[in-house]
Amino acid sequence: MVKKNVRIAIAVSILSCSSMAIVPIAPVAAQSAGVSSLLGKASDNALDKLAQPGAFFADEAVRILLPGPLKNAGKLLRFTSKRGLTKDLTKSMNDAASLAAKEAKPVFRDTINGLSLKDGVGIVKEKGGATNYLRESSGDSLREKIRPLVVKAMGDVGAFDQMEKLSNVSAVRKLGISSDNLTDHVTEKTMDGIFKYMAAEENKVRKNPLKSLGGILGKRK
């Protein structure tokens, strides 16, 4: 009975996040657990969607474009592509982001589970508030953990090889874009996309937490 009451309290605490007020009857521990469940569900759903092949590239809201000078070097890149020097680098970057998202679940889960009790209770109750708080409090740490996933993914899709070939073209080399620059850019934009999707998923859970988290809460015996 006690565990059942805790499960109910967790759901109530998430309902409180939707209504802009903390519900007094929800224990502090249950509120913290509710926030963790909220963020965990949101991150899992977001990463599942973005991990689908072509997901980043298909959605203009999160599609990763070429960085800085390369973004405006369309004619030059079309020329190098015709010469067989590179494939579509933009597509490769987005494919790498989807691969990184596929591997990012445990990274986000570990960070979410590491939020302190004070963090859980102190989150501002607003649309996407929990996701925004996670980004502000743990964004740098998450970025450091996601970057190696992006590095591996970019190697797997051939983005580094494409960049190296491009760098052999004097006109491209003068633009000052390196593999490290490209990795930083893709990592940052991958994080942007993940958090954007997380906020949307969080809002879905807020609208109907009992339905969204019912399966999770029901498994806690």
Image (tube, grey):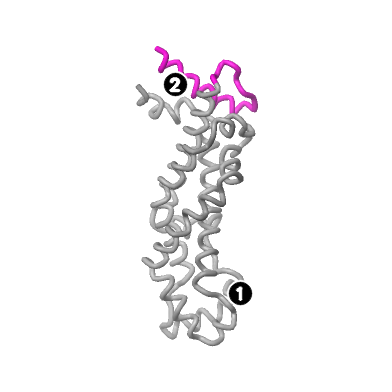
Residue 106 point in image, percent of width and height: 40, 45
Q: Give me the C-alpha separation between circle 1 and circle 2.
A: 52 Å
The image's mark for residue 69 is 1
Label 2: few (<14), some (14–19) or many (≥20) C-alpha neighbours in 10 Å = many
Residue with the mark numbered 2: 7
Q: Quadrant of residue 206?
A: top right
Question: In the picture, which quadrant includes the C terminus?
Answer: top left
Label 1: few (<14), some (14–19) or many (≥20) C-alpha neighbours in 10 Å = few
Q: What is the span of residues highlighted in magenta in the rendered image?
A: 1-27
Residue 50 point in image, percent of width and height: 44, 51
Q: Nearer the viewer, residue 167 or 112?
A: 112
Magenta span includes 58? no
Question: In the picture, which quadrant includes the N terminus?
Answer: top left
Which residue type carries mark 2? Arg
Whether 52 is drawn above or below 70: the answer is above
Which residue type carries mark 1? Pro
Disc 1 secondary structure class: helix
Verify CB contact (< 8 Å) between mark 1 and mark 2.
Answer: no
Q: Residue at x 50, y 28 (%)?
A: 34
Q: Nearer the viewer, residue 106 or 80?
A: 106
Q: Earlier in the sequence, mark 1 or mark 2?
A: 2
Residue furthest out toward the bottom: 170
